[in-house]
Image (tube, helix red, strand yellow):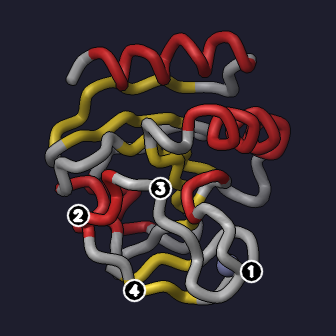
Amino acid sequence: MLIRCPHCNKTNRLAVEKFSSTPSCGACHKPLFSLPIEINQDNFNEMINQKVKPVLVDFWAAWCSPCKSFASTFTLGAEKNGSEVIHAKVNTEKELLIASEHNIRSIPTLIGFFDGKELIRSNGALSIDQLQNLTNKVIYQL
Ligand SMILES: [Zn+2]
């Protein structure tokens, strides 16, 4: 799967099996999942259908101010829990097809996926504690 490094923007080619460890960027050597990664039409389905690690996806848009304030919370979540749950972001203005396929009616919306299944969904910006609760549910539902 091609994954753009959230630290240096270099595109990494990474086998899904490597998700079980803590994969690092080939260019800057920082852990790829210690910040939210941007995903799009090219890698979204492969990302949510893999069953190595659950994925929490933040559906957002640049015009949405609650999305902007939630972005820093989501970043803190990735720093803390990125080794257990991949934190990913989908820009709903660019990825209209993904947003429509997953019935995104308001943003921000968070969806936890594992093995192609939607585990949990939450609408609206969350506090760091609420995000941690949701992340725990994604982890323990496995
Ligand atoms: Zn990098």
Q: Quadrant of residue 35?
A: bottom right
Q: Is residue 53 above or below residue 101?
A: above
Three-letter amino acid code at disc 4? Arg
Amino acid, disc 3: Thr
Q: Is residue 88 above or below residue 23?
A: above
* Mark 2 CB within 8 Å of ligand 1: no
Residue occupied by mark 3: 22
Residue carrying label 4: 13
Q: Is residue 51 above or below residue 5?
A: above
Q: Quadrant of residue 58?
A: top right
Q: Mark 1 or mark 4: which comes first in sequence?
A: 1
**Residue type for callout 2:** Glu
- Residue at image coords 31%, 65%: 18
Q: Earlier in the sequence, mark 1 or mark 2?
A: 1
Residue at 27% in and 54% down: 48
Residue under circle 1? Answer: 8
Q: CA distance from mark 1 to mark 4?
A: 14 Å
Secondary structure of the residue carrying tag 4 is strand
Crowding at dot 4, Cα within 10 Å, few <14 / some 14-19 / many 20+, comes out as: few
Q: Nearer the viewer, mark 1 or mark 2?
A: 2
The amino acid beneath tag 1 is Cys
Q: Is mark 1 within 8 Å of ligand 1?
A: yes
Q: Could you say which is closer to the camera, residue 83 or residue 3?
A: 83
Q: Quadrant of the N terminus?
A: bottom left
Relative image position of residue 15 (x, y in whole percent)? 27, 75
The residue under the point 53% across, 47% down is 87
Q: Is residue 54 left or right of residue 33?
A: left
